[in-house]
Image (cartoon, helix red, strand yellow):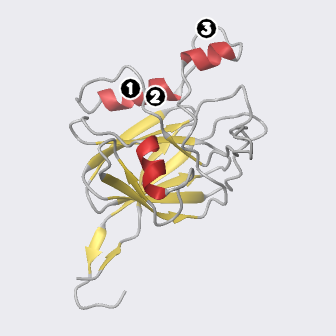
Amino acid sequence: MIVNFGAPLHLKTVPGGSGYAVAVNAGQRVHIVNTLGHQVVDTWALSPDGLQRLSMSHTRLAIGRVSPQVGDVLVDDARQPMLQLVEDDSIGDHDTLIPACDAQRYRSLGFTGYHASCTDNYIAAVAAFGVAIPTRAPDPLNLFMVVPVAADGGLTLESSVAPPMSKVVLEAIRDLVLVVSACPQDLIAINGADMSPRLIDIFISDPIDTRGGIQ
């Protein structure tokens, strides 16, 4: 059997600073498009029952590096495959070290009052699927986020270099729920020099059985 993929269909425009979750069937591909450029996208996956979650620590060991590359398989906290990174034209790295922003992060940056966060976006999105509502977010795959690791182990958070309309494509290895947050960070310049969260677009494509054809 030779399988290719149909043209991706637009699924959702996610406003800057907000989150979204979608059920993805095994074999489907999710296209995460940095529509306006320079937007960090916190990304998670969990099993439909919520018991297994994409794990950055397990994935780093599985792929042997800090930032995933095309062809790498991302695994859950039981070391089982969940997603494969199949396309990436975003130029920059993708971070696996930095946790999702939360209320305490914004307080530490001097913000008072409520501030939207990737943690809150994750909790709200997962709650809509009827699984156990989490109280915090697992460490995300921070797509389009630039976090260089210096020779002495030091970390710096730099502005995303993802060009407008660049994308990452993830293929589901099994049925799962994919969650994204167009990071609302506007106090440091990870989402571009103007520190302005931007919308992203999500597309999905289905595998097509092309028996006897040539891909």
Viewer-nearest residue: 108 or 211: 108
Lower sequence index among marks 2 and 3: 3
Q: Name the amino acid type tagged 1.
A: Ala
Q: Quadrant of the C terminus?
A: bottom left
Which label is found at residue 211?
none
- Please report the residue visible at 50 percent of the width from the left and 56 percent of the height from the top: 64
Viewer-nearest residue: 154 or 184: 154
**Image height check: is 71 above or below 104?**
below
The residues bearing labels 1 and 2 have C-alpha atoms spaced at a distance of: 5 Å
Q: Name the side, left or right, on which 110 lies relative to 100.
A: right
Q: Position of residue 187 (x, y in %)?
A: 72, 25
Q: Name the side, left or right, on which 132 lies relative to 215.
A: left
- Please report the residue visible at 23 percent of the width from the left and 29 percent of the height from the top: 131
Looking at the rendered structure, the secondary structure element under dot 3 is loop
Which corner quadrant of the image does residue 213 belong to?
A: bottom left
- Please report the residue visible at 67 percent of the width from the left and 15 percent of the height from the top: 108
Which label is found at residue 121?
2
